[in-house]
Amino acid sequence: MNDTAAPSGPEITVLQSAMRGLACKCPRCGQGKLYAGFLNLAPACDRCGLDYAFIDSGDGPAIFIIMLAGAIVVGCALVVEVKYQPPFWLHAVLWLPLILATTLLPLRSMKSLLIALQFHHKAAPGRLIDRAK
């Protein structure tokens, strides 16, 4: 039996999967912990036993976070520069903490959201198909 197959029962919606992801819970049962550390995945769910070996979120979560954080920080920095023209050291004092907050805080839940959506949509590596000539 494939461990990534959904259990027999009511079909789980995309919203339910997304909420499980944002809560950093197991994508199958929604009860077990997904992480063993800050970004280190547990080997398997402690509730339903789902093997997490299939998970490969890659750089997707980091790219989303970089794009969102970049837009927020650059937008705020531009507004402050145009309106107040503070010295460069003040920019560093203002924006370094904001950069850390907007990148590190949402990274864990963004990674688990993408993992939950990967599980929900039964994502698999691309395969070449042999086409008849």
Image (cartoon, rainbow, N blue to C red):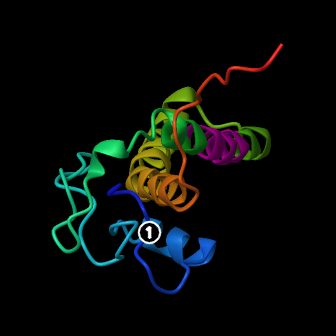
Which residue is more in the foreground, 132 or 110? 132
Q: Position of residue 91 (x, y in %)?
A: 55, 36
Q: Position of residue 82 (x, y in %)?
A: 79, 40
Residue 37 relative to residue 79: left or right: left
Q: Which residue is mark 1?
A: 6
Q: Quadrant of the C terminus?
A: top right
Q: Position of residue 121 (x, y in %)?
A: 58, 57
Could you tell me which residue is drawn at 36 percent across and 44 percent down?
A: 54
Residue 118 relative to residue 43: left or right: right
Would you say residue 42 sits in the magenta stretch?
Answer: no
Residue 47 relative to residue 15: left or right: left
Could you tell me which residue is drawn at 46 percent across and 67 percent down?
A: 22
Q: Residues within 10 Å of mark 1 (few under 14, many from 20)?
A: some
Q: Looking at the picture, does residue 6 appear above or below residue 122?
A: below
Q: Position of residue 79 (x, y in %)?
A: 75, 46
Which image quadrant is residue 56 in? top left
Q: Residue furthest front?
A: 132
Q: Residue furthest bottom?
A: 10
Q: How many marks?
A: 1
Which image quadrant is residue 44 in? bottom left
Q: Residue furthest right?
A: 133
Residue 126 relative to residue 31: left or right: right
The range drawn in magenta is 66-77
Magenta part, dominant SS: helix
Q: Quadrant of the N terminus?
A: bottom left
Q: Looking at the picture, does residue 17 appear above or below residue 42?
A: below
Could you tell me which residue is drawn at 63 percent across and 46 percent down?
A: 68
Mark 1: which amino acid? Answer: Ala
Which image quadrant is residue 18 in? bottom right
Secondary element under disc 1, as helix, strand or loop, is loop
Q: Looking at the picture, does residue 10 appear above or below residue 119?
A: below
